[in-house]
Image (tube, rainbow, N blue to C red):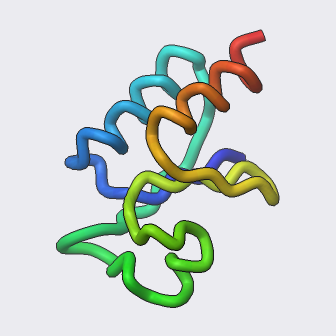
Amino acid sequence: MLNILGKASSINVRKVLWACAELHIPFEREDWGMGFRHTDTPEFLSLNPNGLVPVIKDDDFVLWESNSIIRYLASRYAG
């Protein structure tokens, strides 16, 4: 299952959520970022050394940067 890390109020996270909705990709989302879990923790920085949201985990594959994530989702799930 696709896991999206980031708060829904972030415009970059919303872009990824919108792409998932358009492509009918099931996902789970975890709140990370200001006001939620901090992105400067070793746990988060091990996924994205920039410390920014969004980040996706698709099984063992990890990717950050919203535009790169959208291109990945379209390539993998658009059929």
Residue at point 39%, 57% (across, down): 53
Residue 46 placement: quadrant: bottom right
Going by the image, does 69 lie left or right of 30? right
Image x and y of residue 55, in percent: 52, 55
Image x and y of residue 29, in percent: 47, 53
Residue at point 38%, 76% (across, down): 39
Image x and y of residue 63, in percent: 62, 51
Q: Which is nearer the eye, 44 or 26?
A: 44
Residue located farthest toward the top when viewing the structure as drawn? 79
Q: On screen, 69 above or below 46?
A: above
Residue 79 placement: quadrant: top right
Image x and y of residue 69, in percent: 56, 38
Q: On screen, 7 above or below 13?
A: below
Residue located farthest toward the bottom when viewing the structure as drawn? 42
Tally the marks.
Answer: 0
Residue located farthest toward the front when viewing the structure as drawn? 50
Q: On screen, 32 above or below 21?
A: below
Residue at point 55%, 84% (across, down): 43
Residue at point 47%, 46% (across, down): 65
Q: On screen, 57 above or below 68?
A: below
